[in-house]
Amino acid sequence: MKRHFVLLISLLLAATASATRISIYEAGYPQNRDDNVRVEEVTDVVRTRGIYIEHQLHLSFAYDFNSWFFTNYNELELEWTFQMPEEVTLFNLYYWKEDSVCRAMLLDKWTAQKMFDEKSSPTREPALLTRGSADENGQVPYTLRLFPIKRFTQCRIMIQYLVPARPSSGRLRTWLPLPQLTTETGGAKILRLLYLHADTPDSVAVVGLPGITFTYYARDKAWEAELPIAFLDYAELILPSPIQGEYYLSVYRKGDEAFYNLAVYPPPLASVHQPRKILILIDFNPGNSSGLSSDLLLTSLKETMERALTHADSSSVIVSFTEPVFGSRTWQGCSQQNIDHLFRDIWGRRFYNVNLSQELLAAGESFIQANGPGEILWITNRADFPAATELAAQYAREIAGHFPAGTPIHVLDLENTYRLVYYPDFGYGNSSYTFLSELTRITGGNLFFYRYHPLKTALAALFFDKVMHYKEVEVQTRMQNGYTYNRQNHARFEGYYPLDFPVIQTGQFQGAFPMTVTVIGSTLDTVVKKEILIPESAVDVGTEHLAIAHYGHQIEKMAQWYQNNALIENMIALSTSAGILSPYTAFIIPDDPTSCYVPDFIDDTRKGSSGADLRFALQDTLLGFSAAPNPFNPQTTFTISLPAIPAEHELVVNLYNLRGQRIRQLRLPALQPGRYRISWDGRSDAGVSLASGKYFAVLQAGQQRKTLPLILLK
C-alpha cells in the first residue's frame, strides 16, 4: 500500500516538461549540470516591420552558486536550449565583451562547432548559437553555448529575430518569448518590454498576464511595461496594424534587387454560416505525449479558434489540472476578446503526469445541463481505455449517455508513447482506437490521432469542419512592364484558409508600378477570383528586414524538402549570404573579437525609463582609457578620451587589488567631450603607500566601463 501511495505522489509531482533549460557545467563534462543560473536584465525590444514583428531579446546570465560537483570554476560553460516556431527568422547574435559589443559571424555548423569545442587552444570562442530542423509540429530547437561563465560576473547577449504577425480584429498580435525565458527551476523573473514605433503612437496591450500597464515616452517614441513572469506563463502583445482595407504592400530596394511584402485578403465567398457551439475538454498528461508541450498545445488551440470561429459561434474550455478549471461557466461568443477571456484562468497552471478524465467529463456534463446542448471536443492522451471490443463499446455508450442524445463527441487523441496494437481489420494502431472509434461512431464525431497527424493540422480539421473556408488560396502578382519571382506564401494552416484572414506573401520584382494582384480562392466545389490594382502611391517603403523575411521564408521552405548534398550546400550559401541562421549554419563569436566589434551599436534598452544618454551609447567602444607609465613607480597618469558627456557629468576611476577590494577612488568633472588626465600616486584612500604588485583600474563613465591592469614596481 505504501509503495502505491508513493508512486501516486511521484506521478502528481512529475510536472509539465519544458523545452527550455538554462544550465551550467564544466567544459567537457555536460553530464554534471547545475540549473541555478540567474537570468537578469531581460528586455524585449519590439518593432513592427510591415506585417512582421522584430524582437531584440536582450538578457544577461550570471552564476554565483557554490556547487559541490564543480572543481574548476574557471572552466564553466553555459547552455541555453529552447524552441521557437519554424516561421521565426533569427538573423543576429550580439555578445558583450566588457564594455564593447561584438556581432557574431555566420559559418557552416561543422566548422563553427569545431572552433567552439577546440579545447587544446589557449583561448576559446565565447559564444555559439545553433538550431535544428523543425519537428512535425513546426517547432525548431535552438542551443546557445557561452564560455567562460565566471562567477559573480554577468554575461550579456542579444538575439534578433523576425516573426510574421497574426492579424486579428484590425490589430497585429505576437507571442512574447516567455516559454523561452522561463524554466521549471528558474529562468527570468521580470521581462521589460519596449515597443518602439515609427509614426503615430497608437496604443499597445498585453493579453495573458493581468494588470499590465504601459507608460509612453515621447522622446523615444516608446511604450514600456514591466512584466512579472514565471514558468508556464504565456502572453501576447497586441500592436497597431498597417493593413488598411483589402491589402498592404511594402517594398525594399537593395542595389539591383527589389523585394516586396504583400498582405491581401481572400476574395469574398457567398455562404450561409451555421453557428457552432463547441465545448472543449482537455485532459493532458505530459508523460503520454512525446514531443508535445503544454504551451504548444494551448497556444495552437487558441490560434485555431481565433481563425476558424466567429462571434456567431460559441465556445467554452474546461481543462483538467488537479481539478477541472473552467474558461467560462457559460457559452461565450467567439469574439477575439471572449477567446482571450476563455484562456485567462488557464495560463500559468501546471499539468501533472496523471489523467483525470472522469472528473473532466463530469464537469462537461454539468456544463451542458446548465447551458444547453453543443458539440464536445475531447482532447486527451489517456492510455488506459478498454481495448477489448465489448468493454470498449460498453464504456463508449456510458460516456455518450452522460450527454443529450445527438451530441457529437469529437476526439483528438494525443497519446503517442505506448506500443501500438495490431488490429485484424486495418493493422497496427493506438491501443485506444477500439474505444475512441466506437465513441465517435455512435455520436457522429470526428477522430484524429496525434501519432499520425501534426497537431495544428488536426486542430484545423476539427474546427474548420462545417465552417466555410478555402482549401487553397493562390496569389498571383505582376508588374506593369515587368514580373515578380521567388514568391513565398506564408500560411499557418495549409489547406484551411479562413475567409477573413490575409495571405502573406514575400517576393522579388522587376519593373514599374502599378502592381496587379490576382487572388484565387478554391473550395471543394467553387473557385472565386478577385483582382486588385495597387498604385505606387499606396506602397509603403520597407526596410532591410523585408529582404531578411523573404530569405527566411525561403530557408524555411528548403528545410522542408528532401535533404541531399546539393540542397544543403545551397542552403548554407543562402544562409551565410543573407545572414540568417539555418539548420546547417551557426553564429559564433571569435576568440579575438576585434574584427566583429560594432562601434556604432545602438543600445535600444537605454530608451524609455532608463533615460540614458543615447549619444553616449552609440560610441561605447570609442571610450579611451590608458595609463603611462605602466609598470610605474611611484606615480602613473590615466588618459581618458571621452566621446560624449555622461549624464552624471563626472568620471570615476576605482582602483582594486587582486582580492577585489577597492583601495582608491579618483573623481573628476566631465563637462564636455575631449581628453582628460588624472594621476594616481600609488597610495590608498587612507594615504598608505601600497606594496608592489598587480592592481586594476576601472573607469566608470556613465553606463560604460573600461578596465585596465596596472603593475606597481618598487
Image (spheres, helix red, strand yellow):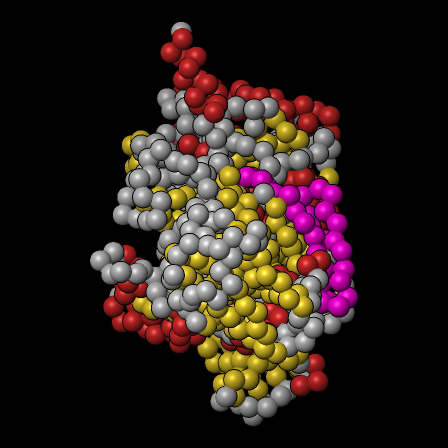
In this view, the residue in front, 211 or 128, is 128
The quarter of the rendered structure image containing the N terminus is top left
Q: Is residue 249 above or below residue 238?
A: below
Residue 162 found in image quarter: bottom right
Residue drawn at the location 55% of the way across and 39% of the way down: 231
Which percent across, then down, holds residue 511? 55, 90
Left or right of 220 in this view: 142: left
For residue 169, say whether it is visible.
no
Residue drawn at the location 30% of the way across and 37% of the way down: 427
Q: Is residue 360 above or below residue 430?
A: above
Most distant residue in the top direction: 1
Residue 568 found in image quarter: bottom left
Verify whether residue 214 appears in magenta: yes
Left or right of 451 in this view: 321: right
Most distant residue in the bottom direction: 481
Which percent across, then down, holds residue 188? 55, 45
Verify whether residue 195 appears in magenta: no
Which percent across, then down, holds residue 82? 45, 49
Instruction: Give the magenta range.
Output: 205-233
The quarter of the rendered structure image containing the C terminus is bottom left
Residue drawn at the location 67% of the way across and 49% of the way down: 226
Figure disc tally = 0
Residue drawn at the location 65% of the way across and 55% of the way down: 193
In this view, the residue in front, 610 or 326, is 610
For residue 511, say whether it is visible.
yes
In this view, the residue in front, 340 or 313, is 340
Q: Is residue 116 above or below residue 278?
A: below
Which percent across, then down, holds residue 607? 67, 63
